[in-house]
Amino acid sequence: MNEKILFDRFNNITKVKIEPKGVEVYIAIAELVAVSKDEYDDKLLEALNMLSERSVKNNYNYLLLTCVSSKGLDTKVGVVSRNKETAWKELEVICSIIETLTHGFVRCLHTNDFFDTVEECITPQSLSPLNFLMRVLRRSNAYQIRNKVIVHPLSVIPYPLIHTAREYQYLASVFSRGSIPIGHLYSNPNLKVMISDEHILRHILIVGSTGSGKSTTASVLADKVAEKGYAVVIIDWHGEYESLLQGSKSVTVYTNPLKGSVLEPLSLEDLIKREPLSFIEILESSLELTPPQAHILEDAVNLLAQKFTGQGYCIDLIIDMIQNSAATARWFTESREALLRKLKPLSSSYLNIQWSKLSRIKIEKGKIYIFDVSAISNTRVRRIIASLLIRSIILNAQYNNIVKPIMLVVDEAHNIFHSENPLSTLIAEVRKWSLGFTIITQAPSMLSPVVIKNTNTKIIHALKTTSDINAVISSSILKKEHKKLVLSLKPGEALLVIPEVVEPILIKIPKL
C-alpha cells in the first residue's frame, strides 16, 4: 500500500503524519548563523557533541540540514518529537546550548517551518519535498531519526544584523504602526516589514547597482502603495516597469508620448503661464545654456506667456520666436544659433510627436501610471520631458488640481535630481502638498546632497563603488560592518534605514 504524508503548521512547528501507519511527529526548526567566519568551528563541534550526548541520554532526535545552492549557504537545526510542546521547548534548549558554548559566535534564529525549509532546498530537478521528507523519516526503525553529528559550514552575517528578543519585540512594534508591506526581516521571515504613510511622504531613496533588485523593490512598493489608495506615477527610464508590474493587483496604465498618450498634468502651457521661471530653469540646466543663451530663451518664454492663445506646441512656438528675433549684436547672433541647435531635439518634427493630438490620461487614486521615456533616444530630451512632468505634477498638487496623495517614482534619478537641476531643492517642500518621492538610482554619488538628505527612508541594495557607498553612508548611521555587507548583498536583499530604528535593518524583498 502506498504511503502518504500529511502535514499541518502551527506557527514555526510542522506536524507530519504518515498514512496508513498513523505515525505522527512534530518538527521545530531554527537557522544557524555565524557572526564570524573563523571563530566558531571548534566551539560548534563541542556544542554538537553535547547535543549528541543529550539526545542519547534523553531520547531526543535532532536534525541538522545544510543546503548549498546558487542562492548561498543555509544551515538549519531542528528537533523531531511526538509532542508539539516538547519539540518547541527542546529547540529553545539546544539553541541556548549552541549560543552559550560558541560564546555567541553562532546564533539560532527561529525561522520558517520545516516543510518550507525543505522546499527551499530541493530544486525542481531533484526530489519533491514530500519524497525527501519520507526518506528522512525512514532512516531508522519506527521512523526515528538516528543521532549523527556532522560539522556543517554556516552562513555568515554581521553581528549587528542579528537581533535579540527585545530588539525583535521593538521592531515588531515599529512595523505594526505601518500598513504598507514591502518584505520581511532577513533573520526572521515571519516578521513582515511594514512602512507607513509618513515614510512615503517624507520620501524614499532606493539605491543599488545594476541587477541588485532596486527596480523590483520599486515595483513592489508601487503596488502596495496603490493598494493603499495613492495615485502612483512612475517615470520609467528604461521601459521595464510594464513587465515588472504584471503581477500587480492594482490597475496599471501605460503612457508614452511617442505612442500617442501622455499624462494630463504635463501641460507646458500651464507651466509657462504660472511658473515661467521654473520652465526656463529646467531647460537652462538640462541644455547647459550659457548666460546669453538663457537670456534669449527667457525673453522668448516671457513673450509667449503674454501672447499664447492655446494654439500650437509651446517649444515649436518658442523656436519660431527666437528664429524671427532681430539680431542686435554679434554675440546675440552666435548665442541665438547655438540655442536653436540645443532646442531642435525638442521640436515636434524632431521627436515625431503631434502634441495636440496626444491622448491625455487623467490621474486617479489607487492606480499606477507608467510614463515611459525610454524610446526617446536623446538623453537631454528625456531628462527635460521627465523634469517638466515632475514640475507640472508639483504645480498641480500645489494648487489642488490633482488627486492626492501621490507617490512619484523617479527611476535613474541621478539624471534629474543632480545639483544643477532646480527640482532638487523642491523635494523638501512637496510633503505639505501630500506628494512623496521615491528616488531610484544606481549612482547615488551623482545625486544632489539635498535630495539624499531629504529622503528619510533609505533602501540600500548592493553597491560596488566606494564613491556611491560613501554618498549613502554620509547621510546614514552605517558602521564598518554594514559597509562590507553592502558590497555582498544578493538580489532582493537590502539594508533598510528608517528614522524609528537607530541602525540599519537587513531585509528581504520578494518579487510581485
Image: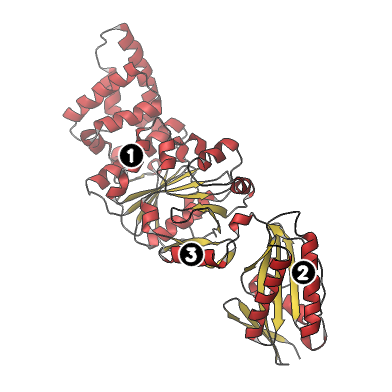
Do we see residue 126 in this rendering?
A: no
Residue at the image point whose x is 82% and y is 68% from the top: 150
Q: Is label 2 in a helix, a strand or a loop?
A: helix
User: Position of 310 compared to 6: left or right?
Assistant: left
Query: At label 3, which amino acid type do we have?
Result: Tyr
Of label 1 and label 3, which has the lower sequence position? 3
Residue at the image point whose x is 75% and y is 88% from the top: 2
Do we see residue 325 in this rendering?
A: yes
Cβ–Cβ under 8 Å for marks 1 and 3? no
3D distance between C-alphas at marks 1 and 3 = 34 Å
Q: Is label 3 in a helix, a strand or a loop?
A: helix
Q: Nearer the viewer, mark 2 or mark 1?
A: 2
Q: Nearer the viewer, residue 4 or 477?
A: 477
Q: Label 3: few (<14), some or many (≥20) within 10 Å?
A: some
Residue 7's label in the rendered image is none
Residue 354, percent from left and from top = 33, 37
Residue 252, percent from left and from top = 40, 56
Q: Label 1: few (<14), some or many (≥20) within 10 Å?
A: some
Of label 3 and label 2, which has the lower sequence position? 2
Query: At label 2, which amino acid type do we have?
Result: Ala
3D distance between C-alphas at marks 2 and 1 = 58 Å
Residue 47's label in the rendered image is 2
Cβ–Cβ under 8 Å for marks 2 and 1? no
Which residue carries the number 3 mark? 170
Residue 235 occupies quadrant: top left
User: Position of 326 compared to 108: left or right?
Assistant: left
